[in-house]
Amino acid sequence: MINIGEVIETNDMIEKENLDVRTITLGISLLDCIDSDLNRLNENIYNKITTVAKDLVAVGQSIENNYCIPIVNKRISVTPIALVGGAACKCPEDFVTIAQTLDRAAKKVGVNFIGGFSALVAKGMTTADENLIRSIPQALATTDFVCSSVNLGSTKTGINMDAVRLMGEIVKKTAEATKEQDSLGCAKLVVFCNAPDDNPFMAGAFHGVTEADAIINVGVSGPGVVKTALEKVRGESFEVLCETIKKTAFKVTRVGQLVAKEASRKLGIPFGIIDLSLAPTPAIGDSVADILCEIGLEHAGAPGTTAALALLNDQVKKGGIMASSYVGGLSGAFIPVSEDQGMINAVEAGALTLEKLEAMTCVCSVGLDMIAIPGDTRDTTIAGIIADEMAIGMINQKTTAVRLIPVIGKDVGETVEFGGLLGYAPIMPVNQFSCDAFVNRQGRIPAPIHSFKN
C-alpha cells in the first residue's frame, strides 16, 4: 500500500526537484508499409503513423492532468528507414522524401520528435543503407522533428570502419547544411555501437525489428531528485551513499511504471520498457554534473570523476531494475554537455576536456553527447573520435554513442545556443594531430575475442 508520506515525498520530487517523465515514446513498425512504388510507400507511412499515434499526445496530457506528473515529450520511433525504403528508394534524394513524410506525420499528431531515420551497418552496408546515410544532411536540413541514427559497430560483429569514415563526412555535411541554425542538424544525428532497439530517447530512438507492431516505452529522468537525496547524507560512507542512490532510483522508476501502464491501457498498446536515465536539462538543479559534485568533486572532470560516475550509474541501474519488470533502453546516467549546466560550468572552468569525457563514457549510460566543436574540424578527425567511442562500446559490451556538433563559423572560446532542452554549449577544443591514415584504411575492425560465446 502507498502511504501519505510517500505521496507527499513524490509530490516534493515533482514540484521542487525537477522529477519528470522525460518522454512517452510510441514505437511503430513500418514493415507492413513497404512498397516498391515510392509514392505509395510514403502514403502508407503517413497513414500508419497518423492512425496509430492519433491519440498519443492527448493521452499523455490526460495522464499529466490526472496524476500531476510532468510528461515533457511525446515522441514516436519507427522501424529503421533503410529497411523500409530499400525497395523503393534508388538514390539519396528518394530517402529525403521519406524524411519529409515522417516530419509531416509528426506535425499532424503533435509529437516533439520522430526517430528512426536510421541504418544498422555494424558489419556492412547495403545500397539502401548507404543511400540513406548520404541523404542525412539534406533530410535533417529540410525537416524539423526528424531524428537520425546509425549503428556502426557491435561487440558481436566489430566496427565497420568504412561506415565510420563515411559518418565523419556526413556529420560535417550536416553541419554545413544547417549552418544558418548553428549546425543544429547535428544535434538530431547520433552514431552508435551496440544500439538498443527499445530506446525511447532521441536522437537515437528507433523501433527494432524484434518489437511488436506498436509498443509504449517510457523514459524517466530525475537528476535533481538524486542530488537532493544525496545532500541529506553528505559526508557519510560509500555504503550509505550507494543505498541512497539506489532507493531514490527505485522511487523514480515507480513513477515511470505508473505512467507507462496507464498510457498502455488508454492507448490499447502493449507496454515495452522503462528507461531510467538521469538525463539532465539546462534547468538549474537538474544536472548529473551537480550529482558528481555532491558526491565530493569540486567540478565534473576532477580526479575521481570516472569512479564517481561509475558508482552513480551502477546504483541507478540496481535501483531501477527492482522497480519494474521491464527495464531497458539506455538506463543510467547521461553526460551531455549542452544539456547540463554543471557540465557547461566544468568546461568553462577548464576542469572538463573532450579526453576526460571520453574516459567517462567507459562507465556512463551512453557516450560523447551534445558536444560542440570548432566548425573547421576535419572529417577524418570526427571519424577518429567516433572510432574511439565505438571501440569503447565494442570492448566493454556496452552501448556507446557520439553526437558531435561542428559549429560552422565558430571556434574555441565561443558558445552556441540551441534553445529548449538542447541548451547551449561552449565550443570545446579538439586534438589537432592527424588520424587520416588510420581512418582511410578500408574494411572493419574485427569483433573482440570475448564476443565468441556460443
Image (cartoon, rainbow, N blue to C red):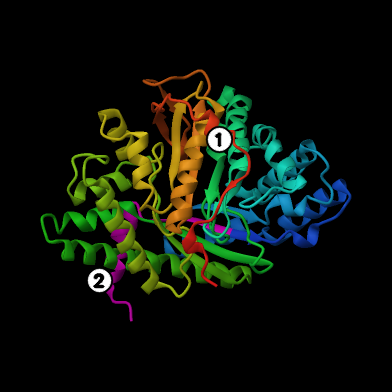
Point out residue 399 in the picture as x, y percentages from the top left corner: 47, 55
**Would residue 417 be found to the left or right of residue 206 on screen?**
left
Q: Position of residue 338 (x, y in %)?
A: 41, 36
Determine the residue positioned at 54% across, 29% down.
436
Residue 114 vs residue 375: left or right? right
Question: Is residue 285 at all visible to an observer of this figure?
Answer: no
Q: Quadrant of residue 134?
A: top right
Give the residue drawn at x 39%, y 21%.
412
What amino acid type should be assigned to the residue bearing mark 2?
A: Gly
Among all residues in the image, which is located at the extreme top? Answer: 409
Q: Earlier in the sequence, mark 1 or mark 2?
A: 2
Residue drawn at (56%, 61%), measured in percent from left and top?
198
Residue 300 appears in the picture as rendered: yes
Q: How many marks?
A: 2
Quarter of the figure that contains the C terminus = bottom right
Q: Which residues are magenta?
A: 1-25
**Secondary element at tag 1:** helix
Q: As shown in the figure, which amino acid type bears the numbered disc 1?
A: Val
Relative to 300, residue 196 above or below: below
Residue toward you, 6 or 311:
311
Above or below, 269 against 164 in this view is below
Q: Residue 243, position in %: x, y?
A: 22, 67
- Residue 5 - label: 2
Question: In this orientation, which residue lies closer to the viewer: 190 or 107?
Answer: 190
Up the image or down, 53 lies above or below 326; here it is above
Of residues 198 and 307, the one drawn nearer to the viewer in this rendering:
307
Name the quarter where the N terminus is drawn. Answer: bottom left
Residue at the spot of label 1: 439
